[in-house]
């Protein structure tokens, strides 16, 4: 065997979940008040452009079938979810199975002063669900996630444990966290610890 | 802890999400090479540090990651208002900040 083939075999790249090292030790579906899961196989895009740029809004609508949301809100279509990040910045989460090449599609449709950057490998998407979620969020963040202020369709970037996260309310006792990939292992361990009394189950393989 | 209104996120947020960035409305000299060392030193290093009303920049570092201006009393810590970068204290847009 040649040296390079041997190297290739020894270092065959494997896509490893950022929850790989924490998941196996926290399987407890029956007794858990919080279930943590990872949404894999999605493409995350950072979109920047002026909200007054009508062709930009129109192209996003045409390609992703969803309107750029207003301040502090998210919006969904069958193809994508879009989150407001700043006055000229949004995050689009696209399911790889429904739209394989969103960057090319958007770049093809949008002309002018905009930026479309694939940040899939920088961030990962976690879902937290269950009766213990409200208490978990209170422990994790300085932000007020009470349903009276932060119902479905709201999103906010804030502190989470000693990291930061983009948090979105999906429904009752169901939130999504978008966290930098290198912080996922830490955040997952922090969540398990914060749920010590109520129990935390990490789903997936 | 302060609660600071971010003019971009349009809500009050905890101080923990922000980092202070010093005095606001310091215009960079248009032609630095024509300045004396003293004038350049003033621009780079010297700040008013007033007792009372202070206009300062804050960065919403854990939130929308934008800079904005705050009017804060340095004695009572009361924040009178927040306003976006590019606006002068009277609320008018500053030349060269038309976001294009
Ligand atoms: Zn903000």
Image: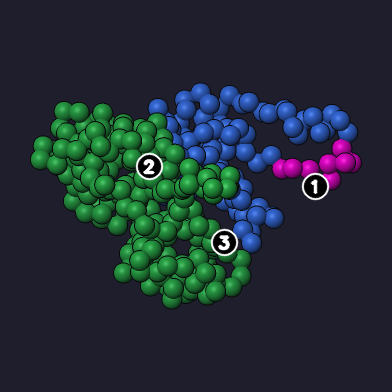
Chain colours: A green, B blue
The residue tagged 2 is A18
For label 3, the SS is strand
Q: Which residue is mark 1?
A: B30
Q: Tell me which corner region of the image, top left, top right, bottom left or bottom right, holds residue B40.
A: top right
Query: What residue do we see at 51% from left, 30% from top?
Result: B73
User: Can you tell which of label 1 and label 2 is closer to the viewer?
Assistant: 2
Comparing B95 with A117, the one in front is A117
The lab-note entry on whether marks 1 and 2 share a chain reads no
Chain under disc 2: A
Main SS, magenta region, reads loop
Circle 3/circle 1 CB separation < 8 Å: no
User: Does residue A158 appear in this view?
Assistant: no
The image's mark for residue A115 is 3
Provide residue B25's location: percent of width, then percent of height: 65, 41
Q: Compute the Cα span from label 3 to label 2.
A: 28 Å
Nearest-to-viewer mark from 3 and 1:
3
């Amino acid at each position: 065997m040649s040296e390079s083939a041997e190297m290739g075999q020894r270092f065959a790249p494997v896509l490893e979940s950022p929850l790989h090292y924490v998941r196996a030790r926290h399987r407890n579906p029956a007794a858990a008040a919080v279930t943590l899961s990872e949404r894999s196989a999605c493409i995350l895009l950072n979109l920047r452009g002026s909200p007054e740029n009508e062709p930009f809004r129109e192209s996003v609508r045409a390609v992703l079938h969803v309107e750029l949301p207003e301040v502090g809100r998210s919006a969904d279509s069958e193809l994508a979810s879009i989150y407001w990040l700043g006055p000229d910045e949004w995050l689009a989460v696209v399911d790889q199975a429904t739209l394989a090449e969103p960057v090319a599609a958007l770049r093809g449709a949008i002309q002018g002063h905009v930026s479309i950057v694939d940040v899939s490998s920088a961030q990962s998407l976690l879902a937290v669900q269950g009766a213990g979620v409200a208490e978990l969020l209170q422990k994790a963040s300085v932000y007020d996630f009470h349903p009276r202020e932060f119902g479905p369709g709201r999103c906010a970037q804030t502190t989470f444990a000693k990291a930061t996260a983009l948090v979105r309310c999906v429904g009752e006792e169901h939130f999504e966290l978008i966290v930098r990939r290198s912080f996922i292992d830490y955040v997952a361990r922090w969540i398990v610890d914060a749920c010590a009394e109520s129990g935390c189950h990490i789903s997936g393989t | 802890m302060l609660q600071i209104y971010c003019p971009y996120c349009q809500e009050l947020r905890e101080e923990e999400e922000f980092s202070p960035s010093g005095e606001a409305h310091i215009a960079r000299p248009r032609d630095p090479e024509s300045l004396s060392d003293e004038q350049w030193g003033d621009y780079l290093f010297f700040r008013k540090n007033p007792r009372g009303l202070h206009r300062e920049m804050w960065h919403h570092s854990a939130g929308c990651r934008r800079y904005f201006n705050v009017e804060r009393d340095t004695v009572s810590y009361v924040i009178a208002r927040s306003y976006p970068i590019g606006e002068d204290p009277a609320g008018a847009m500053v030349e060269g900040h038309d976001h294009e």
